[in-house]
Amino acid sequence: MRQPKIIDYFLLTILSLIWASAFFNIKIATYSFGPVTIAFLRVFFGAIPVLLLCYFKNIKVEAFSKDWHWFAIIGFINLVAPFFLIAYGVNSVQSNLAAILMSTTPLSSTILGHFYTKNEKFNLTKTIGILIGFSGIIFLFSDNLLIDENNFTSALMILLGSTCYVIGGVLTLKISKKKNENVTGSILIWAIIILLPLTFFIEQPFETMPRTDSFVSVIYLGIVSTGIAWLLRFRILTTNGLIFQSQVSYLIPIFGTILGYIFLEELITTKVLVSLIAVCIGIYFVKKGGNTKTI
C-alpha cells in the first residue's frame, strides 16, 4: 500500500459522491417503479461493468460452482434485500434521511464483528462511538417534521437494509479467498435470478410507461452507483487499503444531504444536522477504536 496522493483523495471523493448520489436517484426512480423493480434493474445494470471486467481480465465467474449456495445467500442478503428495503423506505422519506440512516453501517458492523469475528472485539472507544452514533439516529427519529406515524416504518426499513449489508459482509468471509471480481459478479448473477421472477410476478413494470427521469435514474443506479462504484472501490482498496477507503463513511451522509437539497429541494432541519454530526462523530470513534485494546 502506498501513501495517499492527491489523485487518491480525488478518487475517494468521487466514490463518496457516487454512493451518496444513489439516494436521490432512488427517490426519482420511485416516481415510476416499485421497490422490487428498482432492485432488479439496479443489479441487472450493475452486473454489466463487473462481468465485462471479469471477461477482459479472464477471471472465472463461479456463480454455479460448488459454492453456488453461498453466492445465492450473499446475493440475497447483500443485494436483493437491502436494495428492496432502501427503495421501499425512500418512497416515503426524504433521500437525505436515507443517506444518514445508511451511514450506520460501520456502527452495525462493529457490533456484529464483536460477536462473529476474532479480531474485532469491543473496546471503550468503539463503545463510545456506537453510543454516540446510534443516539444521533434515535434523535433523528424524533424529528416530527420528517418522520411521523405515516413513514416511521419506512425509515425502519432503511435501517434494516443497512443491517443486511453488514450481515452480507460477514457472510462474505466464508468465501474470502476468492477474487473480489468473481464474488461480486457471482452474487450479482444470483441477485438477478432471484429478482427477475419476483419483478414480473409482483409489479409487472413493463405494462406502464415510466418517466424519463426515473428510467435514467435506475440505469445510473445500476451502472454507476453499483457497477462502476464497486470497481472504483476495488481500485482504492488495492492501492491504499481498507482504512483509507473506509473514510467514505464520513462523506456519504454529508454529500447525500447536500445532493438531496440541491436536486430535490429536500428540507434540512436542525435535528437532521445534529444527527448527521453525531453519526460522523460516532464513526470516527469506531474507526479510532480499531487501534486500541479490547475490553
Image (tube, rainbow, N blue to C red):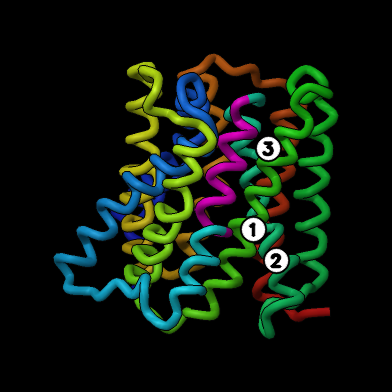
Question: Which residue is at the far left?
Answer: 56
Q: Secondary structure at mark 2?
A: helix
Residue 3 in sight from this viewpoint: no
Q: Secondary structure at mark 3?
A: helix
Q: Which mark is residue 110?
A: 2
- Measure the C-alpha gap from mark 3 to mark 2: 19 Å
Q: Nearer the viewer, residue 239 or 152?
A: 152
Judged left or right of residue 176, residue 90 is right
Count of labels in the image: 3
Q: Nearer the viewer, residue 70 or 172?
A: 70
State the image coordinates of residue 57 (x, y, percent, origin top left). 17, 70
Q: Quadrant of residue 221?
A: top left
Q: Is residue 186 above or below residue 209?
A: below
Question: Which residue is at the far front?
Answer: 201
- Measure the C-alpha gap from mark 3 to mark 1: 14 Å
Q: Amino acid at mark 1?
A: Pro
Q: Secondary structure at mark 1?
A: helix
Judged left or right of residue 168, residue 116 is right
Residue 186 in sight from this viewpoint: yes
Which secondary structure is most common in the magenta stretch?
helix
Magenta stretch: includes residue 180: no
- The quadrant the C terminus occupies is bottom right
State the image coordinates of residue 282 (x, y, percent, origin top left). 72, 52
Q: Nearer the viewer, residue 39 or 281?
A: 39
Q: Amino acid at mark 2?
A: Thr
Q: Residues within 10 Å of mark 1 (few under 14, many from 20)?
A: many
Magenta stretch: includes residue 78: yes
- The quadrant the N terminus occupies is bottom left
The residue that label 1 is drawn on is 106
